[in-house]
Amino acid sequence: MHDIEPYYNWLDLYQASEDERSPFYGREYSEFECTGKVYNYLLHPQWDYIGSETLYVKLLYADYEQGFCIIELIGEWNDCLYNDIMFLYRNVIETLLENRITKYILIGENVLNFHYSDDDYYQEWFDELEDGWIVCLNFRGHVKQEFEAGHLDYYLAMGGNFDNLPWRTASPQKLFFIVEQLITRRLNM
């Protein structure tokens, strides 16, 4: 896992460590020393620790005018043992919500497993969004099944056109436009 880097082609457009409104403002990254790990597997040093033992993130892009962000995740999302949603919500999402981010694109290609506990933090996050949404892109099939088994698909839009979306070929603005079109169609059905 140490050679799986967060997506870096948008670094000329946005860097969370240089954004004063970001929860990762001021962070410094090693180019070579792996300090983060999921269980016994070291992670690339560019992933951001959020307090969880199993889930790391990278805020790839935030647009405060349009109120959206794109977050890439890696590891095991384990609410059952480690309450990862609490760490994600308290240490990342709350700061973004304070800065009027209400539309979230979560990229889950590198989320290996999900373990459900309860929906309290998901509901709290969802309730804070007003006209916003949370979309899960490219999550693995078994991970989506676990989200659905916990009825979290009430709060998180996933599946269908959100699977296998080639997000790396788009700019952040273009990706947001595509996702917003898809979620609007889904909500109007």
Image (spheres, rainbow, N blue to C red):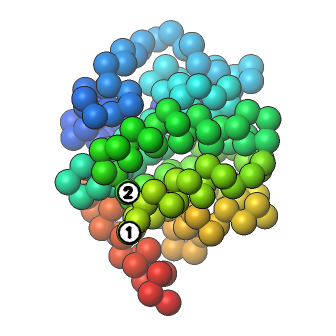
Rendered residue at 29%/55% (across/down): 67
Residue 131: image tag = 1
Quarter location, residue 111: top right
Gap in Å between the C-alphas at discs 1 and 2?
A: 7 Å
User: Which comes before the other along the chain, label 1 or label 2?
Assistant: 2
Task: Locate the N terminus by quadrant.
Answer: top right
Quarter location, residue 160: bottom right
Dot 2 falls on a residue whose secondary structure is: loop
User: Along the horizontal axis of the image, is 54 left or right of 125?
Assistant: right
Rendered residue at 36%/15% (across/down): 28
Residue 34 place in picture, x, y as percent: 55, 14
- Name the one closer to the observer, 116 or 73: 116
Quarter location, residue 154: bottom right
Residue 102: image tag = 2
Dot 1 falls on a residue whose secondary structure is: loop
Q: Residue furthest top?
A: 33
Classed neighbour count for the residue bearing mark 2: other residues with Cα under 10 Å, few (<14), some (14–19), many (≥20): many
Tag 1 near tag 2, CB within 8 Å: yes
Residue 48 place in picture, x, y as percent: 48, 27
Q: Amino acid at mark 1?
A: Asp
**Residue 167 appears in the rendering:** no
Q: Amino acid at mark 2?
A: Thr
